[in-house]
Image (tube, helix red, strand yellow):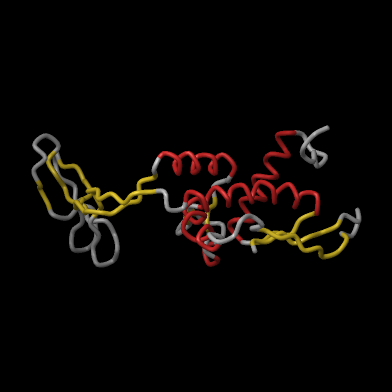
């Protein structure tokens, strides 16, 4: 006898469905689904949250020097024209006063970078393993602002694993399991399947 519900789907479809629903639950905090699906999603979500709670403080802070593009007053990248061969700066800007692009012989437009010291969190081995286990289950999430719906501009990739470690896990430090709950709503019209709300406690 199987230790899981088959949900009337092939294994590939079932895995995709469960991954989508676990991702939606952790991103939004609650989802509405059928009781059978909710119980399967609950098992996976509780395991991921337990992993995040266990490994949330398992990192060290490290100072690194990175290159960051220099920006002008409008928030656009600063670009220069440099010589192809020697690398000498031919012009501090790649546009003239009217905003037209300047063309120079043997000149290449390059972005100006500044070196900045940053503090980053470096995962210790067990936290890195937990992060990879989570990424095997969670789908990538892209946040789209309402005003730009349907456009790629200003969309933002959400780091759901970082959200788990930094926001969700600290809430459940003193809790030993039971991170989600199922609340029955009603029977669905059509097939009379029990609809429930699955939410984070």
Q: Position of residue 100 (x, y in %)?
A: 24, 57
In the image, 115 versus 22, the foreground residue is 22
In the image, 66 versus 136, the foreground residue is 136
Q: Quadrant of residue 185?
A: bottom right
Q: Position of residue 82 (x, y in %)?
A: 14, 44
**What's the residue at 54%, 63% (across, down)?**
171
Q: Position of residue 60 (x, y in %)?
A: 34, 49
Q: Quadrant of residue 25?
A: bottom right
61 displayed left or right of 96: right
In the image, 102 versus 41, the foreground residue is 41
**What's the residue at 56%, 39% (across, down)?**
136
**What's the residue at 25%, 52% (across, down)?**
68
148 displayed left or right of 37: left
Q: How many marks?
A: 0
Q: Can you say which quadrant of the picture contains the C terminus?
A: bottom right
Q: In this rendering, is residue 133 above or below 69?
A: above
**What's the residue at 48%, 54% (across, down)?**
165
Q: In this rendering, is residue 86 above or below 162?
A: above
Q: Quadrant of residue 92?
A: bottom left
Q: Can you say which quadrant of the picture contains the N terminus?
A: top right
Q: In this rendering, is residue 9 above or below 95?
A: above
Q: Position of residue 36 (x, y in %)?
A: 80, 49
């Amino acid at each position: 006898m199987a230790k899981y519900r088959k949900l009337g789907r092939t294994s590939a479809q079932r895995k995709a469905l469960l991954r989508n629903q676990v991702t939606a639950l952790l991103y939004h905090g609650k989802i509405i689904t059928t009781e059978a699906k909710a119980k399967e999603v609950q098992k996976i979500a509780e395991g991921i949250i337990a992993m995040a709670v266990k490994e949330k403080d398992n990192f060290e802070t490290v100072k690194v020097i990175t290159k960051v593009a220099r920006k002008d007053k409008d928030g656009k990248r600063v670009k220069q024209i440099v010589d192809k061969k020697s690398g000498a700066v031919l012009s501090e800007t790649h546009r003239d006063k009217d905003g037209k692009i300047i063309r120079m012989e043997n000149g290449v437009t390059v972005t100006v970078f500044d070196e900045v010291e940053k503090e980053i969190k470096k995962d210790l081995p067990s936290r890195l393993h937990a992060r990879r286990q989570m990424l095997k289950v969670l789908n990538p999430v892209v946040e789209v602002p309402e005003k730009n719906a349907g456009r790629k501009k200003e969309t933002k990739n959400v780091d759901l694993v970082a959200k788990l470690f930094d926001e969700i896990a600290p809430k459940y430090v003193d809790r030993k399991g039971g991170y989600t709950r199922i609340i029955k709503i009603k029977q669905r019209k059509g097939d009379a399947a029990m609809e429930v709300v699955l939410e984070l406690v």
